[in-house]
Image (spheres, grey):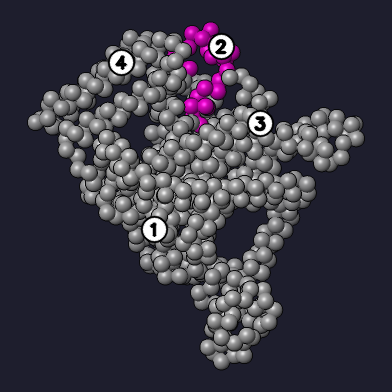
Amino acid sequence: MRVIVPVLTVLAVIVALWYAACIPMNVKGVLTEAERAGAEVNPPGAKDRRDLGAFGLVLGNSFAIPATWEQARPRLPAPHQVANELWNTTVMKKITSKRSLVYHGWVTLSATLLGFAIGTGLGILLAVGIVYSRVMDMSVMPWAIVSQTIPIIALAPMIIVVLYSIGVQGIIPKAIISAYLSFFPVVVGMVKGLRSPDAMQLDLLRTYYASSAQGFWKLRLPSSMPYLFTSLKIGIAASLVGAIVGELPTGAVAGLGARLLAGSYYGQTVQIWSALFAAAILAATLVAILSVIEQRVLKRMGMA
Amino acid sequence: MTFSRTNITALIAGLLGVAAISTFGENKIEIITILMCWAVLWFANVKLAHSGWKHARWLAPLLFGATLLLLWELTVAFFDVPLVILPAPSLIAMRFVQSIDILWQDFVQTILKGGLSGYIIGCGAAFLTAVLVDRFDFLRRGLLPVGNFMAALPIVGTAPILVMWYGFNWQSKAAVVVVMVFFPVLVNTVAGLRETSAMQRDLMSTYAANYWQSFFKLRLPAAMPFVFNGLKIATTLALVGAIVAEFFGSPTVGMGFRISTSVGQLALDMVWAEIVVAALAGSAFYGVVAMAEKAVTFWHPSQREK
């Protein structure tokens, strides 16, 4: 209760603000349509209205307020329009339909998961290499850290086109972008995690005459788990962004990014917002799944 | 231990070499040259890393970077890799020098106008919101889960909407950056403002300090490591937002615009030159924030021990 009531209040305030913002954002379009339909508008003529502020128009034409929440192509769709569109394009459509968000979401999700698996696997391997080899630590680790400060996503359009020109297309290029976005957070987090046992614990293993491999499996790997899960959660969110951005430059026909792009070409704002919410729900679900796994695993290991 | 590991490395390199030679039979000499270069430079790096020399800490990564560049250059030169797949580093460097004017204009448009203004507005707004949220416990309990949730979302997807609202010029890019940097900075600042212990707060109240005195003298300084953590995360996000927003529409200048049109023209040397600019700008931006952090949080253990 301590959390739910404030969160619901904040969400209610956000929805209320959203509805309120729809009025000034959409009023000009509504008035133009109303005038075409023959209604009395104050002042008449789209030209005269252009220079007026949105709030003045709302005050002068209060009859138009309900219509700002019902436009077909509003500048800012109202929450219930987005919810409607989401409902219609997920539950009401067959999932094989090209207009179903489940279909587009699956296209993006499959690239995300494939990329995430590749990126995480390679990231963990590189982290192990860095922890066990002084040369790799000194020469590779600084680059892994620097790469975090680079807007690496700028590479995305090029990767798509280059892979296309050598005949690779479909899910693989998007998965590669996803993979390298999730790669570096995992490397950095995992190196931190594998180094987290302190000198006393390492010494204890040495007094047990434990081999290097035993030290890895029994001490370093288990104690890196909290760090691993933290970076996995960052990594999967980054993977999803990568898959979405990977759909932008080539004008892909399927996927959430393609829905965003098509919506922005044709001014279908409701479509953009519903794709955006679908992506948000997808991201939240993926992170939530990882959190549940994290809790289970850490509890099992006696760490949480 | 070191000796055996070097042996294993050599063995793997040798096997790879044999495999490569048997695949590209006609290019034996080129392959051997590339592998030799790799082996020699890697060996030098091993020596350097184990030498214990004080400059090794920054020389080793440089040598590794130079090794990669050299191998890249050699591979492109020996196998005539076409420009549309991978331009050689030397070609990219030439393109960079020749197009420095265009690159500078793109840099000003995307980074300075779009990225930096959005960064300042977004971080400022997030900071003020955080102070407000911290003042009222109800707001904190309500907004923080929402903020945490928002920070994990693919916010870059708002770019087409904001481009539609604010037009094609840099204002829309700044708006995308504002939305992107807001939540990480908010969440980190709120966490930081709660960092003081009850004992420290009690001490302030025994001094009869009012809310703002204890805020400026105790809680704000204590929050600074967290604030800077958020600011550092936000630097990368700002550049990502400014560049990706240009994919949805831009004037005929800007880094995102140049990347997407150059990819369309298969002028990959230009794309790489822009990526170099993005990398330099990103590291410099991060570096400036990290230096400011060092100056402000000089008292923090993580800054002192170095």
Q: In which quadrant of the rendered image does the N terminus of chain B lie?
A: top left
Where residue A18 appears, as percent x and y from the top left, is 63, 65
Which mark's residue is nearer the viewer, 3 or 1? 1
Question: Closer to the camera: disc 4 or disc 1?
Answer: 1
Q: For residue B252, which numbered disc appears in the image?
A: 1
On screen, residue B9 versus residue B242, left or right, reads left
Is-magenta flag for residue A131? no
Q: Which amino acid does the dot numbered 2 rest on? A: Leu
Looking at the rendered structure, the secondary structure element under dot 3 is: helix
Real-space CA distance between mark 3 and mark 1, rounded to the nearest whole angstrom: 40 Å
Give the residue drawn at x 41%, y 46%: B104
Q: Is residue B168 left or right of residue A30?
A: left
Q: CA distance from mark 2 to mark 3?
A: 39 Å
Report the residue that reaches farthest toward the left: B26
Q: CA distance from mark 4 to mark 1?
A: 48 Å
Q: Secondary structure under badge 1?
A: loop
Identify the magenta region.
A189-215
Residue A184 placement (x, y as % from top left): 44, 35
Mark 2 residue crowding within 10 angstroms, few (<14) / some (14–19) / many (20+): few
What residue does disc 2 label? A204
Q: Is residue A186 above or below residue A268?
A: above
Q: Are marks 2 and 3 on the same chain?
A: no
Quadrant location of residue A201?
top right
**Helix, strand or loop under label 2:** helix
Query: Which residue corresponds to mark 4?
Result: B43
The residue indicated by pointer 3 is B296
Q: Which amino acid type is marked by label 3?
A: Val
Q: Kindly indicate whether the residues beneath marks 4 and 3 are on one polypeptide chain.
A: yes
